[in-house]
Amino acid sequence: MDFTPAQIKTLERLLAAGFQFVTFEKYPRFVGVERDGFVSLLEPAGERLTPFGSPGYLFGSEIGVLLQRNDEKVFVCHKQEVAATDQLLQRYDQFKVDLAAHLDAVE
């Protein structure tokens, strides 16, 4: 995958902020970034990297989505699920805020 200089600067900011790169065989055209057990797929678009879909919870090499079941929130991937505790949801929200801040930063 080839990146523009602006995209490379964004990737460097993400690394400096503690994000790690992950690959997903199912999504070869996207860059995966992970931190604290959460992951987002990023799509190179023009000079930017933009999120593809919503961030999710990392289940091995799969991405789980946040769902509301009855009165509870859970992260689900196929037949696996993890209860979305208040602490986990706080980390998820922080992941989203930090990711957005680094993607929107201007050099």
Image (tube, helix red, strand yellow):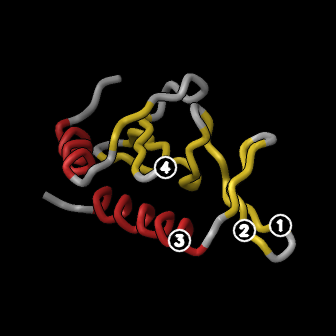
Q: Position of residue 7 (x, y in %)?
A: 26, 41
Q: Position of residue 36 (x, y in %)?
A: 43, 53
Crowd band around label 1 with a 10 angstrom C-alpha radius: few (<14), some (14–19), many (20+): few
For marks 4 and 1, the one nearer the N-term is 4
Give the quarter of the image for residue 100: bottom left
* Residue at the image point whose x is 19% and y is 61% from the top: 106
Q: Which residue is mark 3?
A: 87
The quadrant of the rendering that contains the C terminus is bottom left
Q: Position of residue 14 (x, y in %)?
A: 27, 49
Contact between marks 3 and 2 (CB within 8 A): the answer is no
Crowd band around label 2 with a 10 angstrom C-alpha radius: few (<14), some (14–19), many (20+): some
Label for residue 9?
Answer: none
Residue type at mark 2 is: Lys
Marks 1 and 2 sit apart, C-alpha to C-alpha, by 6 Å
Mark 2 falls on what kind of element?
strand
Marks 3 and 4 sit apart, C-alpha to C-alpha, by 13 Å
Marks 4 and 1 sit apart, C-alpha to C-alpha, by 21 Å
Label for residue 73?
Answer: 2
* Residue at the image point whose x is 40% and y is 68% from the top: 97
Contact between marks 1 and 2 (CB within 8 A): the answer is yes
Residue type at mark 3 is: Gln
Marks 3 and 2 sit apart, C-alpha to C-alpha, by 12 Å
Say above or below: 60 vs 65.
above
Mark 3 falls on what kind of element?
helix
Mark 4 falls on what kind of element?
loop
Q: Which residue is mark 4?
A: 37
Crowd band around label 3 with a 10 angstrom C-alpha radius: few (<14), some (14–19), many (20+): few
* Residue at the image point whose x is 39% and y is 39% from the top: 44
Say above or below: 84 vs 19.
below
Is 38 or 83 nearer to us in this picture? Answer: 83
Left or right, 79 with reference to 66? right
Marks 2 and 4 sit apart, C-alpha to C-alpha, by 17 Å
